[in-house]
């Protein structure tokens, strides 16, 4: 585009045309007899005139070529004959009294497609060989070429050549080359004939499967297309379609049938199948694979129950989800049934498919209950499990004494005094149990104290490495909620830390231990400090609480040195 072209006038005055294009013609592809509009608009000092050129030659307006008032070129009906064609390159020329500018070139293409210059050729090939087809066509714009196999488009890149390697009997078909562009399409076809080997048949055809039951699927197929009369047997191959490393199974049958029922399958499973035909000298290729799903069935068995009690009036029931091989379908619900051992009245509880536990509440204490469970798929309920018995714990008082406040005092480097007072408004304790141990060492035997005892002095600790002492107050005798026999409380209360022991609580003799308070001071005359940890536990029946655990280094008293130094 030329704009602001300098022009030298005779008087020697230099001026500028001030011409510019607003719209220029662009490339276009049209069919014969279609109308065409090539746009051109220019801006400049009026008057501005626009003229058109084709292939560099000025056009003259006529009925076939019309110049529109806005400067565009209109062709009512595109011509495309050997004698006359509108195809070519167009430009518009804009002029005023100061000069002229020429637009970009616009190519007008008339779409066309000819008959094939070369056609694919039919051929006869043997199994396992190679077949090649090709076609060629002249077109504008260039045509897209696709290949079809028995009228189905092949998923290939656009190419005028088709190569088929390792020919198999199923490649015996009609192949078509189709060329297409804006003008239209042309088609040319050829037949490929595959000559079979004489020593083996083609593969069984049209294999299909039908579900009969939760363990059986019917397979049916058509005989091979080639050498079917020489087939002596078929082999049916099947395996699970989901998962990894599935084992493949095989069944061999005679040539007198083209159907077979496989009846050793698992319920609610997807299986894949294929079939091979046999002649005395060889086997066919495998047929196309088909997949089919067996029906669901009722679960093979129920889950195993685990029964526990957290109190004398409940039973916690838990179980694991059934594996797929046992559930034989998607479990939709569970049914939990229970009754007492002396009553035949059964109570049923329906639970959702995702349930793996249920808490039975409001039961009778110290009573034997019988429980069982059943599971259901969409087919129905399985047989319930055998009755499982469980005895609820005996009733005990739930009044528990509160944990007292524990205080420690270091008398010297070998002695510590523990003091405590029962909490106000607390249930009276039946006794105290006092335990202690050096830090990092096993617990020492417990010390049992009477209910009215509120202090105890540890002596003979000695200048040892840092140690700790525990004082635990608790029941002198208790009964387990899971046993009808009493058990003597021993000095070893198990491992206690600053937290409650869940296991001990579940046995209805749980200590609620208090926090540990550690009291430290400076080194004394001889030997390192001895840290003493003390934990106190008071008991009502059957539960008991622990006071906060406290520690104190031997050899100090409230942060000051003792009166007697260690030697």
Image (cartoon, helix red, strand yellow):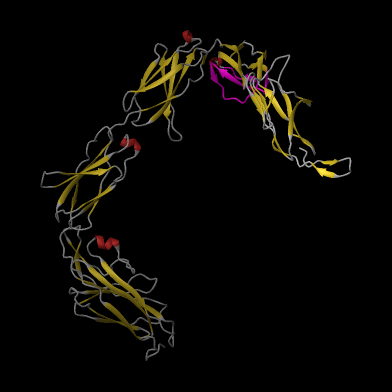
**Which contiguous range is marked in magenta?**
138-167
Quadrant of the drawing holding the C terminus? bottom left
Is residue 439 rendered magenta in the image? no
Q: Is residue 63 left or right of residue 418?
A: right
- Image coordinates of residue 165 in percent, x first then y, are 61, 20
Residue 9, image quadrant: top right
Q: How many marks?
A: 0
Q: Is residue 397 above or below residue 437?
A: above
- Image coordinates of residue 81 in percent, x first then y, are 70, 15
- Image coordinates of residue 135 in percent, x first then y, are 66, 16
Q: Is residue 419 left or right of residue 483?
A: right
Nearer to us in this view, 213 or 544: 213
Q: Is residue 329 above or below residue 116?
A: below
Residue placed furthest toward the bottom: 563
Is residue 156 rendered magenta in the image? yes
Residue 29 appears anywhere in the view: yes
- Image coordinates of residue 176 in percent, x first then y, are 59, 15
Residue 379, image quadrant: top left
Quadrant of the drawing holding the N terminus? top right
Residue 128 appears anywhere in the view: no
């Amino acid at each position: 585009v030329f704009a602001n072209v300098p022009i030298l006038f005779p008087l020697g005055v230099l001026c500028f045309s001030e011409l510019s294009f607003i719209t220029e013609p662009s490339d276009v592809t049209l069919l014969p007899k279609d109308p065409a509009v090539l746009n051109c608009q220019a801006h400049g000092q009026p008057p501005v005139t626009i003229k058109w050129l084709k292939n560099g030659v000025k056009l003259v307006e006529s009925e076939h070529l019309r110049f529109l008032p806005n400067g565009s070129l209109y062709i009512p009906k595109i011509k495309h004959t050997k004698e006359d064609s509108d195809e070519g390159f167009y430009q518009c020329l804009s002029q005023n009294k100061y000069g002229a500018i020429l637009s970009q070139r616009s190519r007008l293409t008339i779409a066309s497609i000819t008959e094939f210059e070369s056609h694919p050729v039919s051929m006869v090939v043997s199994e396992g060989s190679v077949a090649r087809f090709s076609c060629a066509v002249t077109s504008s714009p260039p045509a897209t070429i696709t290949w079809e196999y028995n009228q189905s488009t092949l998923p290939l890149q656009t190419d005028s050549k088709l190569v088929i390697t390792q020919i198999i009997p199923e490649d015996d078909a009609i192949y078509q080359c189709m060329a297409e562009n804006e003008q239209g399409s042309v088609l040319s076809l050829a037949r490929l004939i595959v000559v079979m080997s004489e020593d083996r048949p083609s593969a069984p055809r049209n294999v299909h499967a039908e579900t009969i039951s939760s363990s059986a699927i019917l397979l049916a197929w058509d005989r091979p297309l080639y050498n079917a009369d020489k087939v002596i047997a078929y082999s049916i191959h099947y395996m699970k379609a989901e998962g990894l490393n599935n084992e493949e199974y095989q069944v061999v049958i005679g040539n007198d049938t083209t159907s077979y029922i496989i009846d050793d399958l698992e319920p609610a499973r997807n299986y894949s199948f294929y079939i091979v035909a046999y002649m005395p000298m060889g086997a066919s290729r495998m047929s196309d694979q088909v997949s089919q799903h067996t029906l669901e069935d009722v679960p093979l068995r129920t889950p195993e129950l685990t029964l526990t009690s957290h109190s004398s009036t409940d039973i916690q029931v838990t179980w694991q989800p059934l594996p797929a091989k046992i559930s034989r379908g998607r479990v939709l619900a569970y049914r939990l049934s229970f009754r007492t051992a002396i009553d035949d009245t059964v109570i049923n509880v329906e639970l959702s498919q995702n349930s793996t536990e249920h808490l039975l509440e409001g039961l009778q204490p110290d009573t034997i209950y019988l429980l069982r469970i059943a599971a259901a798929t969409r087919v129905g309920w399985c047989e319930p499990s055998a009755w499982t018995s469980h005895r609820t714990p005996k009733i005990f008082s739930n009044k528990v004494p509160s944990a007292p406040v524990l205080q420690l005092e270091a008398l010297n480097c070998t002695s510590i005094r523990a003091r405590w007072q029962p909490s106000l408004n607390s249930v009276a304790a039946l006794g105290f149990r006092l335990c202690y141990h050096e830090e990092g060492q096993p617990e020492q035997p417990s010390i049992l104290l009477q209910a009215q005892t509120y202090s105890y002095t540890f002596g003979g600790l000695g200048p040892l490495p840092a140690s700790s002492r525990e004082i635990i107050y608790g029941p002198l005798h208790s009964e387990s909620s899971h046993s009808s026999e009493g058990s003597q409380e021993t000095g070893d209360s198990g491992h206690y830390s600053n937290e409650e022991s869940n296991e001990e609580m579940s046995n209805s003799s749980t200590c609620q231990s208090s926090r540990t308070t550690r009291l430290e001071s400076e080194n004394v005359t001889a030997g390192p400090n001895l840290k003493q940890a003390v934990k106190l536990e008071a008991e009502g029946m059957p539960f008991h609480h622990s006071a906060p655990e406290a520690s104190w280094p031997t050899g100090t008293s409230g942060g000051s040195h003792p009166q007697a130094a260690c030697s």
